[in-house]
Amino acid sequence: MNTDRRQFLKACGLLGLGAAVNGVLPVVSEAARIGKEYSVHQTRLMMGTIVTITALHPSKQLGEEAVGRAFEEIKRLEAVFSRFDASTPVSVLNKDGKVSGIPAELAEVMDRSKRFGSLTDNTFDVTVQPVVDLFRAKQNLNGALDLSREEFEHALSLVGQQDLKLSGRSIRLDREGMGITLDGIAKGYIVDKASAVLAAHGAVNHMINAGGDIRTMGEKDKATPWTIAIEDPAKNGNYPTVISMNTGAVATSGGYEVFYDKKHMYSHLVSPVSGKSPNNVASVSVTAPTVMEADALATAVSIMQTRKGLQFINSLPGREALIIARTGEQFATPRWA
């Protein structure tokens, strides 16, 4: 995503899962013949970010249909997970403290959220929403936060996944004022589901890029893997690294996208323990079998200290990470890229 487009989205309050209104930017679509197949390429504004799907198919018409069905799946699931639409289950939960009869997809993501919380020693915690909401509400025109210690401590006291209870198709928050945000996991889950739709419709070779949450399957063309450039958090036009993948996923998390103060001390990434945003890490990229997992792990490692984050990813077979510090220094697991 280029800087001008990101600034436009940020100014409109459109960064974040489900915050965007489809149609703000025009749909960009094209198809080209590559050997015996057609490469169908389409870009839309969804989930508060730019989503691009590139898919290969022997038939141009069927390839376009496959891509269209994948975008339909994204739209359907966006309506399940968004916290900006008052009618979604997540919004109802945040308002009432409980919700029942939730869709199976939300139940699955909530269960995985709890599991990732346990795996990361609760560094990944979807109940940080009260602190994020406080940061957003306390911004002033001078680029600072009008934030009292009492307000901050109260918001932090509402964080803790131990008070998030799941029971079948029901969710309950045990303390009044609690809330959840699934921005660190739901987008990845949606991309994985869109990828499955493409494969089911014959577009086995494809790539989806949803604002840095990337899923690849198969090949870009004959015997050529997909090439992915990791974004430079400093926005200097450089790419810290370029990786190649056949079937896999990579997600990048970083506080550089959304800040609530001029000094860039408070972002949408929040430690569930301290309530503070990481000030030493610019971005974290993680490769994993699914985008949902890469998304959650990148979010968790962003909160951890660099050495601990690398050690944590090293303990997980088949997962790799690249950490870019605010200084520009890079740290990676041994098998990154």
Image (spheres, rainbow, N blue to C red):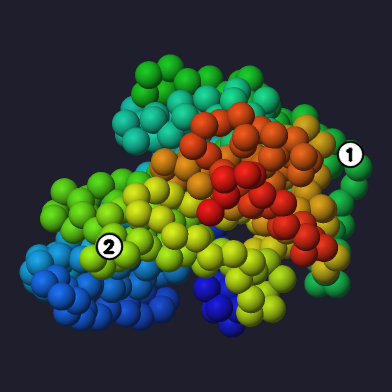
Query: As drawn, is 162 to the left or to the right of 46?
Result: right
In the rendered structure, which disc, 1 or 2, sits on the residue that comes first in sequence? 1
Q: In the image, residue 243 lies at what x, y percent?
A: 50, 60
Q: Quadrant of residue 239?
A: bottom right
Q: Is residue 28 left or right of residue 283?
A: left
Would you name the residue on which mark 2 appears? 223
Closer to viewer: mark 1 or mark 2: 2
> Dot 2: what SS?
loop
User: What residue is pinned by disc 1?
Assistant: 150
Q: Amino acid at mark 1?
A: Glu
- From this viewpoint, is residue 79 visible? no
Task: Tell me residue 210's x, y (percent).
Answer: 44, 61
Q: Are marks 1 and 2 in contact (CB under 8 Å)?
A: no
* Residue 229 in view, yes or no: yes
User: Residue 249 at x, y = what percent?
Assistant: 43, 49
Viewer-closest of 154 and 162: 162
Q: Secondary structure at mark 1?
A: helix
- Percent of width and height locating residue 140: 81, 66
Within 10 Å of disc 1 (Cα), the crowding (few <14, some 14-19, many 20+) is: few
| Image mark for residue 113 | none
Residue 202, placed above or below residue 93? below
Three-letter code for the amino acid on which mark 2 is drawn:
Ala
Choose top left, top right, bottom left or bottom right for residue 204. bottom left
Q: Decide which of 32, 154 is in the foreground and name it.
A: 32
